[in-house]
Structure formats: C-alpha cells, structure tokens
Image: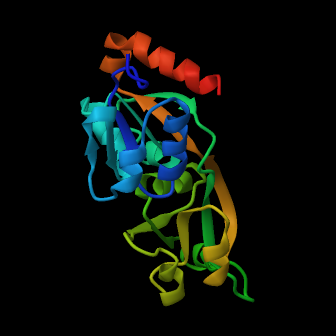
Amino acid sequence: MSPNNGLTIAVPRGALMGDTLDLLDALGVDTTEVRENDRKLLFEDVGIVTMRPSDVPTYVEAGAADIGITGKDVLLEQSEREVYELLDLGYGRCEMVVASVDEPGGDPMVEALRRLGVTRIATKYYAIAQRHFEETGRQVEIVEVKGAVELAPLTGLSEAIVDLTATGTTLRENGLVIRERLFVATARLIANPVAHKLKAQAIDDLVERIRAR
C-alpha cells in the first residue's frame, strides 16, 4: 500500500503548502516533485493535486479528491460545502479580525453606526462578515474586495475591514488596529463523505498516523 493509502489528497498552495508537504513527508509520501515543480498541479504518482486553499472544499465535496487540507476560515466561509472535518492540524494559525483606522476621534466603524445606523465593511469573507454582524445586531453594508483589503478604509471605501491576519504586521503598517477578534483559524483535514465510507480504512489509518506524530 502506498504511504497515502491510495488516497487522492488536495494540497493547498500558498501559506499552508510548506507545512502540508512537511506533514506528508513525515507520513512517508514523497513530495520531492511537488516541491521542485510549482507549475504542475497534478501529481498522480503520489496522489497529490495542488490548488488554491479556497478550491479545496469544492474538489473534496465533488469527490475529485478523497481528502484535503485547507484553513478553518475557508470552511466557515463555505459552510454549505458537504465535507467532513476530521482533524485540526494545528499549523497555519491566523486570526479573523475586524480592523479600522487608528484615528484620534475613535473607531470610524463605531462612529458611522452612531451617526448613520449602518457602517461599510470591506472583506474577502462575505459570509463570515455578514454572519458576525448579524449575530451582534449591527447593520452593515458588505463590500467585497478581492485584493489588498487594507486599502479600503484608507481610501474611504469602507469604515472597517474583516480579514485574516497572522502577525498583525500588515495591519499596523497600514495604520489599522484590531477592534474585534472573531476566531482563530488553523489548517484542517477534511474528507469527502462518500470516500469516508468507501475508503474508511485508508482514511482512518491516515488520521491515526497524523495523530501519532
């Protein structure tokens, strides 16, 4: 049996990729070709397919990959995806926060809510932001931004942002301060529900080997 028990694994590119490949190496999966080729996406010999973290739940839900690794932030943003969350892998720790410009007059978000009853929030995480402000009973207008969301409050596009931060450095360098902390996100192992039944032994074995590390 191969080190990954014949499973197809969706591996996230970006910040989680290095730790994920280290994990697979520790399990005996040879990731040399993946490390040496950043253009190739499918590595059939070792059962690895690489993609953006936000695409991992899509591929796992559809069964194009049996299991996958992605951030808790992605899973909460795509909570409609039918995948099983199996393990908190512990690495890739980030925080989802609300941040706004550090102004002498106070928090621009709070001021907008006080004066207008509504505030504008820029984010890449529409569902998470919408849910957070609904749960806390505040009226917001969500502005979806694909690029550097820190720019939004600096240019007047929004009063605040909801975004993921690892160290807070980028926020500080752009004059933003954290106003609220929503949750801590780490890398999670997820599985396709059908594969979880049909390949239960292989998946259970892999989970036990990860836990035993």
Q: Nearer the viewer, residue 114 or 100?
A: 100
Residue at horizontal 65 percent and vertical 22 percent from the top: 212
Q: Nearer the viewer, residue 120 or 5?
A: 5
Q: Is residue 131 visible?
A: no
In the rendered image, the vertical position of residue 176 relative to residue 129, given as above or below: below
In the rendered image, the vertical position of residue 179 relative to residue 87, given as above or below: below
The image position of residue 60, as x and y in percent, is: 32, 34
Which image quadrant is residue 30 in?
top left
Q: Quadrant of the N terminus?
A: top left
Label total for image: 0
Which image quadrant is residue 105 in?
bottom right
Q: Is residue 177 visible?
A: yes
- Protein image colouring: rainbow
Residue at horizontal 44 percent and vertical 68 percent from the top: 141
Instruction: Say left or right for 36 vs 154.
Output: left
Q: Quadrant of the C terminus?
A: top right
Residue at horizontal 48 percent and vertical 44 percent from the top: 21
The image position of residue 202, as x and y in percent, is: 41, 15
Q: Nearer the viewer, residue 36 or 57?
A: 36
In the rendered image, the vertical position of residue 71 relative to residue 110, given as above or below: above
Q: Nearer the viewer, residue 22 or 160?
A: 22
In the rendered image, the vertical position of residue 127 relative to residue 62, given as above or below: below
The image position of residue 207, as x and y in percent, is: 53, 22
The image position of residue 169, as x and y in percent, is: 66, 74
